[in-house]
Image: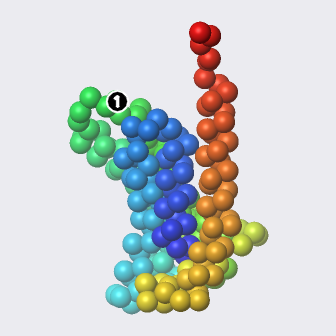
Amino acid sequence: MASIFGHCVLGATLGKLLLPERHHWPYWVLAAACAFLPDADVIGFKFHVAYGSLWGHRGLSHSLLAAGMVAFVGTGLCQLLRRGPTPSPAPKRLWLLLFLATASHGVLDAMTTGGLGVAFYSPFQSERYFFGFRPIAVSPIGVKNFLGEWGVRVLRSEVQWVLLPCLMALLAQKLLRRFATPQIAS
Ligand SMILES: [Zn+2]
């Protein structure tokens, strides 16, 4: 896996790109959480679930189908719980954000240097996939293993290949919005 840092940065960035208004910040946080959620499957290691199985790490939980389900449930819950005068995003846009945020998890994992590949098409296909371009150092499982040289290596690669591209995308969005906003002559 990539680290919680890389996944959450990408999820929150997608949130800001799709729902740029500042009052939508809770959805940026939700997108960050969705981006990390698939790694909840590491609990399977405690119960001796085989890594390469359907329910194993990077299996069904990392699939596009699971991303669609998370987005569906998340959008439904947001509709149920919405309150206050702040306008909430259109359900289709919110679903798209939560889907992209959750699916982004597998995309980052498929760019890491270790572990098994990602079962994007589970449960219809059991094949695990990596991309041809894999610049992100794989993150260890467990906080204890992360503290040290390995964790530094992971964070360094994620700053380069996740944080910087995200900052560039946000900067591009800011510039586009500034130039696209009609200027009122005084
Ligand atoms: Zn993962």
Q: Residue at x 44, y 43 (%)?
A: 95
Q: Is residue 3 above or below residue 161?
A: below
The residue nearer to you, when weighing 11 against 78, is: 11
Q: Nearer the viewer, residue 158 or 95?
A: 158
Quadrant of the rendering where the N terminus is positioned: bottom right
Drawn side of residue 131 relative to residue 83, left or right = right
In the depicted structure, whether residue 106 falls above or below residue 169: below
Q: Quadrant of residue 79?
A: top left
Q: Residue furthest front?
A: 186
Task: Write the residue at 71% across / 72% down.
Answer: 134
At 55% from the left edge and 66% from the top edge, which residue is drawn? 6
Coordinates of residue 90 in the picture (x, y in percent): 41, 32
Q: Amino acid at mark 1?
A: Pro
Q: Label 1 belongs to which residue?
A: 87
Residue found 46% across the figure and 35% down from its top: 21
Identity of the residue furthest to the right in this view? 132
Secondary structure under tag 1 reads: loop
**Would residue 85 be found to the left or right of residue 64 on screen?**
left
From the top left corner, tell me how far across and down residue 49 is, in percent.
41, 85
Q: Residues within 10 Å of mark 1 (few under 14, many from 20)?
A: few
Q: What quarter of the picture does the C terminus occupy?
A: top right
Point out the residue furthest to the top here: 186
Q: Is residue 81 left or right of residue 127?
A: left
The quarter holding residue 76 reads top left
